[in-house]
Amino acid sequence: MPEKRDLEFRGIGVSPGVVAGLVLVLQGGDDPLPEYAIPPEDVPREMVRLEAALIETRRQLHDIQERVGEAMGGESAGIFEAHLQVVDDPSFVDEVYREVREKRRNIEKVLMEVSERYAQTLLQMEDDYLRERATDIRDVTRRILRNLMGGGSDWLAGIESPRIVVAHDIPPSEMAALDRRKILGLAMELGSPTSHAAIMARAMELPAVVGLHDVCSQLQDGNRAILDGVRGRLVLHPTAAREEEYTRLARSRAVIQKRLETLRDKPAETLDGTAIDLAANIEMPADVKAVRARGARGIGLFRSEYLYLANEGNPSEEQQYTAYAEVARGILPDTAIIRTLDLGGDKLPAGDRRTVEANPFLGWRAIRLSLARPAIFKAQLRAILRASALNPGLRVMYPMISSAGEVDQANAILQECMDELDEAGQPFNRGIEIGVMIEIPSAALTAEAIAPKVKFFSIGTNDLVQYTLAVDRVNERVAHLYEPTHPAVLQLIAQTVEAGRRHGVWTGVCGEMAAQPLLVPLLLGLGVTELSVSPGAVPVVKDVIRRIRMDDARALADEVRGLSSGAEVLESCRGFLRRHAPELLELSE
Ligand code: PEP
Ligand code: MG
């Protein structure tokens, strides 16, 4: 009898690894809501359903509060408090009950309507605090709905063995609260390689595939599947032949990984002796351990906004100092770059999807937010400066710089902080190195004017590509247009490096482009001297560095300069890797 066929879904592999197991499907609050009339005798049943969902929601919120509290070092007991207040608000719940009775509609529909009415009323308020509560109401409503509809982030609570989690989307704030031990891998309908959920999956070393259209409706809890985070596949009901193919693949990748592990203490040096600074990107102070374990020298990017993301409100100067001090001490004798707050875009705090901007990536984000809220910015800068007393290699970096003037403004505030610390007799490193992210084309084009104000450039290719090509980095519909090898992007990188060189400013790359084995030779050939990648990618990037010569890398950069499309450039890079480290191609496509 011929074997039954399996069903393959194709998406984008964003975090490597192959896993097989049972799926857990999250039917999210973003799905269409059921709407139906109910007979009068069913009214009490709807109420009982709501009560059960509220109890579950409370339990989840307490649970998340505890888990996030642990991850953040125990100082964040107040997290999700505002969400709990909504669940416990008797007037809100009473209104839902009353409307179910009067309108005789199902509870999901009524809950959504009442919640939206509350949210709209709050959004009209003058008071910032009250307006923010609108977001709490919406967030909690989503959670209650998920519980009513059988999904929810209690998803992991009853799970005995780890699952492949399949979801429409998981916002970074929820990713931060995930229990890694219960998840084999992630499959999402939305997202792209540079969405922050994907970046977090890599940081958690969790195989992940995004951009899997309509997958949720076609899978059921408990289905068996294989997830391939490199090739971007989710295979439902795999046949025996498919299981075998993947077992073979997993084995051959494991052999490569084993060899890569032996590189841990070896230098990131090309065959002709050029040392490259190979650093790692982290999201939380606890990640410093992984940086060491994977053989990186230093931290090229600490995305400090994750301290804010998992938190309700801003972490205090003291909380931040504790976090930065942990990083500064933990990474000694190496260096660490703390990037100042980069909230906005797809990174909004748990209780803050209020900032409904038409174009969030072009909006009130990162340094713009910091300059507009000097009190928040100063608390962060003071905390970084104080931690700099513990490690002379602690550096500060501003994100989303679009002009030299913004660097001046930020530096002036940094100077004020130094003066304040001086007055208070607090020690700090007066010569702390300042750098900027080059991730907006205008910054790359005016790098010459920015260079005299800083010690280093770090190219954020995730954003640079999105802003250069006008391709939303989190929109899977245009993911095929998101080309780091586009000639325009390469020109901006080259221009930045050259402007930096003229002023004695080094240039690194901390975007995901630096973690792609295929593109590492090209970046080095363009003159980049530092690469910062997620800890999991350090070994393979080090391997590439150790197997090439700088002359060849420069020749590659020269060769692609004449090409007119991203696809041609990619093909040249592929040819280069095939000649120098062929087996690594398997890890990159
Ligand atoms: C980037 O834009 O490349 C970057 C490293 O910053 P983020 O991904 O946090 O925006
Ligand atoms: Mg960025």
Image (cartoon, rainbow, N blue to C red):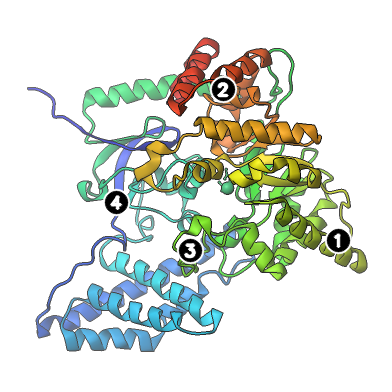
Earlier along the polypeptide chain: callout 3 or callout 1? 3
- Of badges 2 and 4, the one in the foreground is 2
Cβ(mark 4) to ligand 1 < 8 Å? Answer: no
Badge 1 marks a residue whose secondary structure is: helix
564, 359: nearer the viewer: 564
In the rendered image, is residue 322 in sight? yes
Estimate the x, y position of residue 91 in percent, counting from the top left: 37, 89
Q: What residue is rendered at 56% in x and 62% in y?
A: 364
User: Measuring 69% from the left and 67% from the top, which residue is drawn there?
Assistant: 376
Q: CA distance from mark 3 to mark 2?
A: 50 Å
Quarter placement of the N terminus: top left
User: Of circles 1 and 2, which is in front?
Assistant: 2
Mark 4 closeness class: few <14, some 14–19, many ≥20 residues within 10 Å:
many
Residue type at mark 3: give it.
Ile
- Which of the 4 image quarters holds residue 117? bottom left
Residue at the spot of label 2: 561
Distance of mark 1 from mark 2, alpha carbons? 44 Å
How dense is the environment of label 2, judged by Cα within 10 Å: few (below 14), some, or many (20 and up)? some
User: Residues under labels 3 and 4: Cα distance?
Assistant: 20 Å
State the residue position of label 4.
25
How far is the residue under mark 2 from the one under mark 4?
A: 46 Å
Q: Secondary structure at mark 2?
A: helix
What is the quadrant of residue 419 in the picture? bottom right
Of the numbered discs in the image, which one, if any, rests on residue 64?
A: 3
Mark 2 / mark 4, whichever is N-terminal: 4
Residue flagged by tag 1: what amino acid is it? Met
Q: Which residue does the numbered mark 1 point to in the structure image?
A: 418
